[in-house]
Image (spheres, helix red, strand yellow):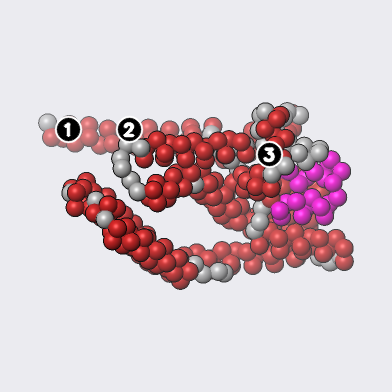
């Protein structure tokens, strides 16, 4: 009986492992990056459409679906800055959607603050925090996208160098990078190639690429290409050297992040601990904590504590943020 049970357990374990492996192989074969790359190549060979954002010939982006609101936003400098941040984040939001989400967060905070008596200063701070939630989400998406593009840059530089050694023109190389490499870097190179096809000069298209992706390593690569086009030289060798420099810089950044991990964790713990203790005491004994915002001395203590927390967080951030 024990042998049958153990044999059944072994077979069940093997069946579960095979099921998991089969599901992973199915997903990677149908939805993985390799499958998407093959599908893109097949669409290109068959003359099908490639799924990417088309570049407007007039370089105009709509900030809203409504013509009246779009015309109003087009005249605002803040709307242009928001649109630039949204383009760099890779999100499909429009400027009007971003502004609407910020105003919606502000309205939600005002409605929630009416449920409990809170000082006016605290209401203003909470409302500002809710209003900044969309901005924080966009900043986070932008930072993640820039990190991913920076990690793809060495491979792109090697790809450019190999294609140049094979005898391809730089315009064709841009198209190859836009179709062969994964997103999000391929989309940016594809947009630069489309601008060139629309008649934009090569240098201007590269400068637009550097403006859309504000990374120092990418700017070095673009400057090297622009200088080589004006003065000549071995571009493939230059790109190979840039790829090596970018890889070494990314290795150094990774080492710095590991060495500064303890300081960053300390900053999070020390920054969140007062708020967590405050929330816990408010739930356990609200009358005891309410003196902080009902008594004038307590209000002064809250402002002083908030100022010290802010100064400490900025100081720790300055200590652990090392530029490489």
Residue 92 relative to residue 277: left or right: right
Q: Position of residue 161 (x, y in %)?
A: 74, 58
Position of the C terminus by quadrant: bottom right
Cα distance, mark 2 to mark 3? Answer: 59 Å
Q: What residue sits right under mark 2 in the picture?
A: 15
Residue 139 relative to residue 199: left or right: left
Front-lying residue, 45 or 257: 257
> Label for residue 192?
none
Residue 268 relative to residue 67: left or right: left
Q: Which label's residue is closer to the chain start, 2 or 3?
A: 2
Cα distance, mark 1 to mark 2? Answer: 15 Å
Q: Secondary structure at mark 3?
A: helix
Residue at image point 71% right, 55% down? 210
Residue range of the region highlighted in magenta in the rendering = 190-211
Q: What residue sits right under mark 1 in the picture?
A: 5
Q: Report the mark closest to the observer, 2 or 3.
A: 3
Q: What residue sits right under mark 3 in the picture?
A: 73
Q: Classify 10 Å Cα crowding around label 2: few (below 14), some (14-19), many (20 and above).
A: few
Name, please, the residue furthest toward the front: 296
């Amino acid at each position: 009986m024990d042998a049958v049970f153990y044999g059944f357990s072994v077979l069940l374990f093997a069946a579960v492992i095979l099921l998991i492996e089969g599901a992973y192989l199915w997903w990677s074969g149908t939805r993985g990056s390799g499958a998407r790359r093959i599908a893109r190549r097949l669409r290109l060979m068959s003359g099908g459409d490639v799924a990417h954002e088309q570049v407007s010939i007039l370089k105009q982006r709509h900030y809203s679906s409504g013509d009246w609101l779009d015309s109003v936003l087009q005249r605002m400098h803040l709307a242009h800055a928001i649109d630039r941040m949204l383009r760099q984040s890779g999100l499909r939001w429009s400027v009007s959607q971003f502004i609407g989400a910020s105003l919606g967060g502000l309205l939600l905070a005002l409605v929630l603050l009416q449920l409990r008596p809170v000082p006016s200063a605290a209401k203003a701070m909470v409302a500002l925090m809710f209003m900044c939630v969309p901005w924080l989400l966009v900043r986070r998406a932008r930072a993640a996208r820039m990190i991913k593009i920076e990690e793809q840059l060495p491979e792109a530089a090697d790809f450019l160098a190999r294609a140049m050694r094979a005898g391809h023109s730089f315009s064709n190389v841009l198209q190859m990078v836009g179709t062969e490499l994964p997103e999000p870097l391929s989309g940016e190179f594809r947009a630069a190639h489309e601008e060139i096809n629309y008649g934009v000069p090569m240098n201007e298209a590269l400068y637009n690429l550097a403006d859309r992706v504000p990374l120092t390593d990418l700017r070095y690569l673009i400057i090297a290409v622009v200088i080589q086009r004006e003065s000549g030289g071995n571009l493939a060798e230059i790109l190979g050297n840039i790829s090596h420099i970018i890889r070494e810089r990314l290795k150094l950044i990774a080492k710095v992040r590991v060495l500064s991990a303890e300081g960053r964790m300390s900053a999070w713990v020390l920054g969140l601990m007062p708020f967590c203790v405050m929330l816990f005491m408010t739930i356990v004994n609200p009358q005891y904590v309410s003196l902080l915002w009902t008594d004038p001395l307590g209000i002064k203590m809250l402002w002083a504590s908030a100022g010290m927390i802010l100064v400490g967080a900025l100081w720790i951030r300055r200590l652990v943020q090392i530029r490489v």
